[in-house]
Amino acid sequence: MHNILKTKIVSALAATAVVVAGGSVPAQSAEKPIQIGLIAPTSGIYARPGTVMKMGAELAVQDVNDAGGISCMNGAPLELVVIDSGDTVEKATNAAQRMVAEYPELVGGTGSYLSSFTLAVTEVTERANLPMLTLSYSDQITDRGFKNVFQTSATAGVQAQLALPIILDLAEEQTGKRPKTVAVITDNTAASLSSVERMKNGLLDDVGLDLVFEEVFTPPLADATALVQQVRQKRPDLLFFLPTVISDSKLILEKMKEFRVEVPVISFGIAIAEPEVLNTMPAEMLEGVMSAVANWGTKGQEKLIERLNTVYGEPWMTQNAVSTYGDIWLFKEALEKSCSRDRAALGDALRELDAGPATYYPGGTLSFDEKGRRKGASLTVIQWQDGVPVTVFPEDLALSQPVWPKK
């Protein structure tokens, strides 16, 4: 399966860097399509998650159009415009500038992937008055007073605040002992640093964890030996693990196995749970590893998960697919409310939206606070079990029961 998946992704990336991809158009509609932009990395070291974001958006555009398009605009269909953000902040900025210049009829956008990319992209889209939805975590994204940036995920700080008590309670429940010490290994991307900053500025103290070792590195990591040796010497009860690049995760976990460092690994984000991980390391190396992520395939989404597998060969649904899928439906809600192709009207509709409980995001509602953060946004906790990362929290969305990693 994984070789087939890789072949499909390579073929997709070879096809184009900037594409316009529309879902099926309602036969009864003669209306001009409404363009939604997806700006995400489809080249470079982050091409894999960016391509998966495109998959989720494409499925949602097809589903919206098959359901009749935007009803208040005589069934106008949606059309997805895909822009490659590249794999650096500079490339993402240039891509955003191209996007707003070359596609003046875009009414909104989603994507960006890394928070550092999103911070750069939204500087451009805000000036263009283009509403942007994003799953990127960094608190800074919606701390700048921008009117047209909307986070569908919980911020990194909130995710850390929610995740730590859950993880510690689980450890105590299954082992009879509450962890007391923690080591942190993180790269220097914006979301990772936001999570660590929140932990160090009171959250670790609040939950009774003593930080015994911290290391920040710039991806890609060349050698993990020194990091792992430090963890081995400190012997923490937990390792908080925040790389955003699969190769970095692989390097660190391999070195931990080589040095026989047996400590429960708790990650934040999805780098540790991408299907491509299994192309680089055996499933047994990942068994028991947990991660707190903004979104994941959950109970109630089984048909969508199966469809993603059938259409694209994806073995499971990561946050990148389900979030962009949800973003397209969120735009539909706002377009039905604004009944306009005007960006300003769509931005107003998103700010005023109150569309009830969220379907494709964990917790909260389809509404935003004054900063542009989705109200009540929660998270999911996933765990590698028998070669698959499955949702184990929250209980009402879980596909499996959690098992505390052995130390």
Image: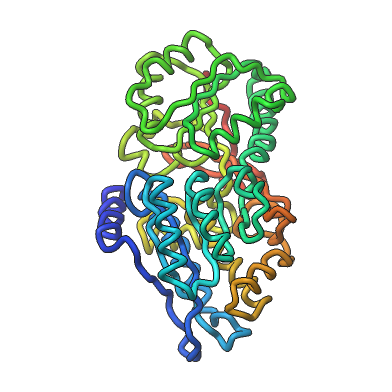
Residue 8 x/y as whole percent: 28, 57
Query: Residue visible at 73% across and 64% down?
Result: 356
Is residue 71 visible in this depiction of the protein? yes
- Report whether 314 appears left or right of 329: left
Numbered circles on residues, count = 0
Query: Residue visible at 72% across and 24% down?
Result: 207
Residue 320 x/y as whole percent: 48, 52
- Report whether 292 appears left or right of 9: right
Image-quadrant location for residue 164:
top right
Nearest the eye: 66 or 202: 202
Work out which residue is located at the far front of the displayed protein and give it.
127
Nearest the eye: 1 or 325: 325
Task: State the colouring used for the structure image.
Answer: rainbow
Residue 208 x/y as whole percent: 71, 20
Nearest the eye: 294 or 101: 101
Residue 326 x/y as whole percent: 56, 62
In the rendered image of this protein, does residue 320 appear above or below residue 239? Answer: below
Nearest the eye: 141 or 331: 141
Query: Residue visible at 71% across and 26% down?
Result: 202
- Report whether 200 appears left or right of 282: right
Is residue 249 visible in this depiction of the protein? no
- Report whether 314 appears left or right of 184: left
Query: Residue visible at 54% across and 56% down?
Result: 323
In the rendered image of this protein, does residue 257 appear above or below residue 282? Answer: above
